[in-house]
Image (tube, rainbow, N blue to C red):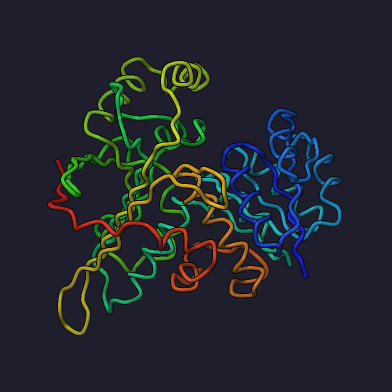
Amino acid sequence: MNMKVALVGAGLIGQSIAHLLRETGDFEVVAFDRDENALALLDAQGIPTRRVDSADTPALRQALAGFDALVNALPYYLAINVASAAKAAGVHYFDLTEDVRATHAIRAIADSSELAFMPQCGLAPGFIGIVAHDLAKRLDDVREVKMRVGALPEFPTNALKYNLTWSIDGLINEYCQPCEAIREGRTQWVQPLEGVEHFSLDGIEYEAFNTSGGLGTLCETLAGKVETLDYKSVRYPGHRELMKFLLDDLRMSTDRDGLKTMLKRAVPSTAQDVVLIFVTVTGMRRGQLVQDVFTRKIFAKDVCGTPMSAIQITTAGAICAELDLFREGVLPQSGFVRQEQVPLEAFLNNRFGKLYEGANTVATARHLAAA
């Protein structure tokens, strides 16, 4: 039987999710948004739409009548409202949020519920946590887990060496919020944009630094089981210094709306991007110190006859794979569901997860050292 899915948010990622789900024939998708232009794009491609203001929780709850699941592709600050509407309407809930506060609130909403609530279903948090947890499980004793992800322009030209490839609200949020990490076996908060590293992959130089939210619930899951655990965003060298100047020296971290306006005006978006995934896990296996590495480079390409950026492919592909695994009964069917409860093998073998498998596996980094 087909699963009836309310897709809330018809932006770039939402449109990709709608295409991927519809293509299978196993999902009936209706897109909700208040933006008529975004809905018109989906209408033109035969995907049913409804004009609903997602900030209006009672209206959203009413619109959800008859659906099995809600997929939330809206900015992080609407997640709690939308999850509350899902619970009131009796539908399962999936989202892409990287916001730590929203995730804690959704966990409280999910408490003792017969519905499933699964936030953080994108790339990071999301797929990156599935990989890290799977690698950690293969060791008898885990010392260090390093998770590095970059969504980058393939052809950087501006001073920031960056183009907008996904939610600008999410980007600013992860640059401004404190970041969870485990150091010397203790969970602690570290500052965003700190902890700079420089490394090189396939002859290209990169930098990585702390950003918020990418670990999902891994700090809690691996507490007491790992000495070091951290997540950093990957950029081209020089990006972090300019962002630190904007956020700290020019105090734009206290004026997020102004920063958003500035970046939208000055930094072009691109569909010619690359997503870099790099996870290393170090520890003991059968008495020997070993390091396991998982790497992928994913490029923009046509999927289902539609051009998609690498960040669209990885983000939409991840949440569709997890919704599909839920539909098949592979994942828990009620309560709060963590990313690390998703088996990596099942994810990569899933029809949507295969979008990750088709990627280039990159060479091991030449060096990965703190600056």
Left or right of 344 in this view: 335: right
Quarter of the image that includes the C terminus = top left
Name the residue located 24 percent from the left edge and 58 percent from the top edge: 184
Corner quadrant of residue 42: top right
Residue furthest toward the bottom?
Answer: 286
Q: In the rendered view, tell whether residue 280 sits above or below residue 288.
A: above
Q: Position of residue 194 (x, y in %)?
A: 27, 37
Q: Position of residue 258 (x, y in %)?
A: 49, 16
Choose between 319 and 291: the one closer to the eye.
319
In this rendering, is residue 67 above or below 311? below
**Which residue is situated farthest in the front direction here?**
305
x and y, in percent, of residue 246 in the image: 34, 19
Front residue (pair 293, 284):
293
Marks counted in the figure total: 0
Instruction: Decide if residue 368 is on the left or right side of residue 12.
Output: left
- Quarter of the figure that contains the N terminus: bottom right
Question: Measuring 40% from the left and 60% from the top, which residue is drawn there?
Answer: 358
Give the x, y percent position of residue 362.
25, 56
For residue 219, which quarter of the picture? bottom left
Judging depth in this view, the residue of 28 and 215 nearest the camera is 28
The residue under the point 27% across, 70% down is 142
